[in-house]
Image (cartoon, rainbow, N blue to C red):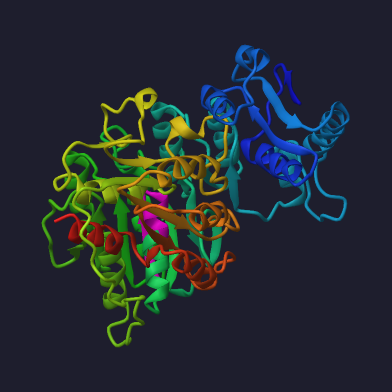
Amino acid sequence: MKFTVVKKGLYYDSVKLMLVTNKLLEMDSIKNIAVVMGTDLNKDTLIRNHLYSEEAENATKNDLIIAMDTDSLESFESALKIIDSELNSRSNDNSEEEVYLSLNSAIKDYNQSNFCIISVPGEYAAEETENALDKNLNVMLFSDNVSVEDEIRLKKYAVSKNLLLMGPDCGTAHISGVPFCFSNHLRKGVIGLVAASGTGCQEVMTIVDKLGGGISNAIGTGGRDLSEKVGGIMTKYAFQLLEGDSDTKVIGLISKPPSEQVKLELMTFIEDNLTKPVIIHFVGNDELIETQKIELATSLEEEAHLLVKKAYPSLATKSLHSELKEKQKLLHYDVVGLFTGGTLAYETLYKLKDKIENLQSNLKKDFHYKSLNLDSGNIILDLGDDFYTRGRAHPMIDPTLRNEMFQSVISKDNKLILLDFVLGYGSNREPHKKIKELLATKSNNSVVLATICGTYKDPQNYEKIRTDLENLGVLVFDSNASMVDYVLSSIK
């Protein structure tokens, strides 16, 4: 029996809705359920899961939709009570977590704090950020949909007060050994990072860790910081902080390509203000002149290797899993990349775009989301893109959408499927669970490659995930670059 309830004007965070949905799915009486905001993307999910209804169609993005398929009306009513209880409880009875209704009330109890993480709808983010900066708090702004004008104004204000403003849309940082949001269990060390890309930062940090090196600080800036308008305000300030940090010996910069003007300004800034060596990787752009201070990397993996070599010249670096994988000739296979990490998707697109004809991607400006067809053609998708995360959790937290796409693709022949699994704090505890189930029933000639971005001490158990996937025929790589190199060798 299928039921739908729409609660008008009731907003809940997508992560909380995901947790409630997962809890209800454990009930034997519930065949399927979705507790989501009424965005177009979530409605598409309801359609795919056969939970769509007239009530859901009429819901707006500001309405809560509860749609389920149960064995009886009693089960439906029981589930509604559980949902209401879960959504309206502030914390578990046994939890020591404090819940505050405002930043001001939190500061009264934690007046020694110097950092604040802000994750609110974009229209409220600038006001909350300014309030935090007024109170001399460094800010990690997880929220997106903040205007570039507000970003510039607030970053200038932060720098004037000698404060960090990491973001907007900043999801990764590691400050003095403390992981922020999407980060990893890392060895403490002497390598400092400045990153305008979250999973790019994680890829470099985790490879550094695997090689035996360590991180002093990793400062996120938000993806727009090196744009023409913002001009690298926070990148330059982060450089200054790492230059003055006695624990940092070498500095790495990771970003998608900045504008030419900003690139030149950065070069001049580094030459004039830094004494420490800097290693730079602009994902998708190698056009930069090396100097005595600046060295260039051609991939995220090479960035990590160069940083470790420079920071630990006498270290006998540990090897990544480097066993030779038997090359396969996959000349007539469609390449389908389903990535949860945006920078990993971007690196893949950049390396493959000149080798594969008609390669589609939502990382290209002319991409049409509504005409997406996974049945044929070559495509690289960043599933953490704003289009796919409106009203739902990021795929590193909730991989449901990626799992659905994988289920569709793995049922077809002649597919070369590329996956990433990004581990660490904040990420899903078992990101490969559904993929394992689908691979166990695979009965065609499609090939699956995977890269794991994580350390051996991350909470998800790196080695177990690797073994689980390899036992099901997946070729697993320790870096995204090595996975893409394998693709290039297979399609020649």
Asked whether 237 falls inside the magenta stretch, the response is no
**In the picture shown, does residue 454 fall above or below 173?**
below
The quadrant the N terminus occupies is top right
Instruction: Give the residue at the far front of this rendering.
Output: 443
Marks counted in the figure total 0
Residue 271 in view, yes or no: no
The quadrant the C terminus occupies is bottom left
Q: Residue at x 40, y 27 (%)?
A: 149
For the record, the magenta segment spans: 191-202
Q: Quadrant of residue 206?
A: bottom left
Q: Quadrant of residue 152?
A: top left
Residue 98 in view, yes or no: yes
Q: Which of 412 and 219 is in front in this view?
A: 412
Q: Which residue is drawn at 56% across and 25% down?
A: 47
Q: Nearer the viewer, residue 232 or 379?
A: 379
Where residue 70 appears, x then y in whole percent? 77, 32
Q: Is residue 400 left or right of residue 454?
A: right
